[in-house]
Image (tube, grey):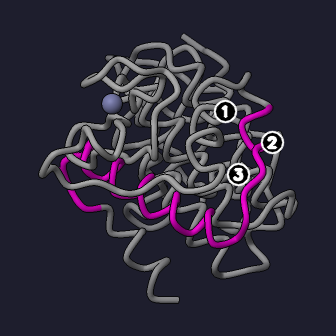
Amino acid sequence: MFRTLNALILREVRYREADRILTVLTEQGGKQTVTAHGALSRRSKMAAATQQLTYAELTVFEKNNRLSVREGSVKEAFAGLRKDIRKLALGSYFAECLETFAAEDQPEPELLQLGLNCLYALSEDLCPEEKIKLAFELRLAAATGYAPETDQCPVCGRTDIVEPVFLADEGRVVCRACRQARRAFPLEGGMLLAMRQVLQAPPKKILRFQLSPEEIRALGVLAEQWLLRCAGKSIPTLQYYREL
Ligand SMILES: [Zn+2]
C-alpha cells in the first residue's frame, strides 16, 4: 500500500552501499522509521529529500509494517542551517530532542509544528540562537507533559509571586521566601513573564517575548536543565553544540 507522509527527517543512518535508514517525525504517525533504498546512489532523486533536517513529502510503500520510500520531494530544506556549523549543530540537537520525546505511531502535530517553526527561525535568523533554543526547550517540555508550573506559588498560593525562583527539581515557580532549602534559579526582570509567554502563546508566537541577552542566557540555563531532567538522559548533540 502506498501512502504519503509529510515528514521532518530527524536522523539518517547510512546502511549498506547506498541506503539510508531514516527516523522521521510526522503529524499523523509521530516518530517512524523509514528505509530509503538507493538514496545515496548517484542516480537517486531522493538524496535531498532524505537528508537530516529536511521537511519532505515522502511517498512510502508499506509492507509487513515496514515503510520504504519510493519518491521524495523537499518541502523545506532549511538551507540556512547548512551554511553555519553552529546552526546545524543546534538543529541536530532539536532533532535529537524531538526523537527523544516523540511517541511512535501516534499523532504528534504539536511536536512537528514546534520543530518546523524553530528550525525555520534558526535557518532564517529570525532571532538569536539562544532565544530560539530556550523557547524550543520550554515548549517541548510542556508539549510532552512536563510544563513548568508558573501561574501561582504552590506554597502560599499567591499569583503575584514575590521575587520568583524556579525550583529546578520540581519544575515549579515559588516565592523566594517559600523556596526553603530547595535548589532554585532566581527569575529576575522579565524572566517569569517570558516563561509564561513561551508556555502559553499560540505556536507561531512563542518567540515574541522580550528579554535582555543576560536574561536570555539565564533563562536558557534553566530551560536546558529542566528539559534534560525530563528526558532523564544526556543528549550527545547538545555536548557537540556546546563545544563549537
Ligand atoms: Zn509563595
**Left or right position of 59 against 17:** right
> Can you identify the residue that label 3 sits on?
119
Q: Where, quadrant-wise, is the N terminus in this rendering?
A: top right
Q: Amino acid at mark 2?
A: Arg
Residue drawn at (50%, 41%), measured in percent from left and top?
A: 138
- Secondary element at image label 2: loop
Quadrant housing residue 79: bottom right
Q: Residues within 10 Å of mark 1 (few under 14, many from 20)?
A: some
> Percent from the top left, x then y, of residue 166?
36, 46
Q: Amino acid at mark 1?
A: Gln
> Percent from the top left, x then y, of residue 128?
76, 66
N-terminal of the pair, mark 1 or mark 2, is 1
Q: Residue furthest left?
A: 181
Work out how far the residue at label 1 is from the one at label 2, CA to CA, in angstroms: 8 Å
For ligand 1, which image quadrant applies? top left
**Left or right position of 207 against 243:** right
Residue drawn at (73%, 22%), measured in percent from left and top?
A: 202
Which segment is the magenta one? 205-234
In the foreground, 162 or 67: 162
The answer to whether any part of residue 55 appears in the image is yes
> Can you identify the residue that label 1 sits on?
197
